[in-house]
Amino acid sequence: MSLLRQPILLLSRSDRLQDLLTRLPATARMVAGYVAGTGTDDVLAVAEELAADGLSTSLDHLGEDTRELHQADATVAAYLELLGHLPARGLSRSAEVSVKLSAIGLALPDGDRVALENARTICRAARNAGTTITVDMEDHTTTDATLGVLRELRKDFPETGAVLQAQLHRTLDDCRGLAHEGSRVRLCKGAYAAPESVAWTDPNDVDRAFVRCLKILMAGQGHPMIATHDPTLIEVALALAGRHRRPQGSYEFQMLYGVRPEEQRRLAAAGEHVRVYVPYGSQWYPYLVRRMAERPRNLSLFITSLVSKR
């Protein structure tokens, strides 16, 4: 099934297929399994349900590759609206937000400055709401720019979380640079297509790279955020926590909304800090396609759903 990953990832950039699928009512059932609705009330309701089960959340307003300033402004406004509701809903302690810089202007002219200013605005709102943000990592071509914005943000908002993708060859060094006290780092395998010149492409190589990176983060002074659904990697993380005498809560597990919910609750019941990555909004297509690439068996379920409901 790993042979399907690259072709599926290429579909995430297909405007024609996106237009087709968004017009099919049958798509809604598949989307609902991974996306918490389109509006603020939808995602807040899901966050409340998960909090009641002892699960934290990272809320992501879907959108990326923004090419118009008004679109970036609209995304910022959506985050401000969301953050403004967290205190009244009792979610400040359990919910944070994840932000893609390309959704708030990174691809625009003078994009580094625009994205930084917009991210600062969201960081201020998050701090006022009693929570934090994590800056998502995207396509490998934006890694330097993303880490550059992160460094600037952390000057005023040191609590801002980082994301690193184990599939990239450079990530081992990036882990060494970010494994310091107070640094929140989400380590994931990576959901974006990347060439062999910069990334591991064999799934087994990616797993081994994930473990090497995780060893650095767990041995460091920061707060590792272990983003995986892989049972073996979860066991490796728990073993490393024991080796380094890390108490529960000094690291956390992160999983996607709709993926292995029973495991999420099992870990939480065992006293582990578990955070569920919950996306919402109308721009679900690229996100959903990358989820299918990570778990290609989802593709057959998706196609079956479309055929049976046409």
Image: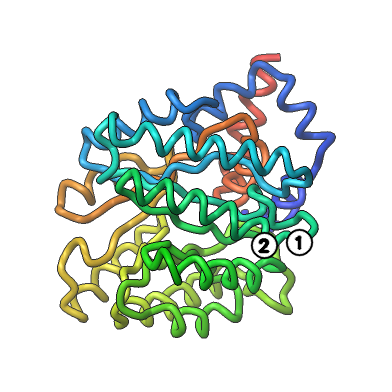
Q: Please tell me which residue lies in front, 279 or 236.
A: 279
User: Disc 1 on helix, strand or loop?
Assistant: loop
Q: Quadrant of the C terminus?
A: top right
Q: Quadrant of residue 119?
A: bottom right
Where is residue 140? Give x, y as percent.
67, 67
Where is residue 149? Give x, y as percent.
58, 67
**Residue at 62% across, 50% down:** 293
Mark 2 touches mark 1? (CB < 8 Å): yes
Q: Please tell me which residue lies in front, 73 or 89.
A: 73
Tell whether 198 sits left or right of 270. right
**As shown in the figure, which amino acid type bears the numbered disc 1?**
Asp
Where is residue 246? Give x, y as percent.
19, 73
Where is residue 109? Give x, y as percent.
80, 58
Residue at label 2?
113
Look at the picture and state if 175 lies above or below 300: below
**Residue at 52% across, 64% down:** 189
Residue at label 1?
110
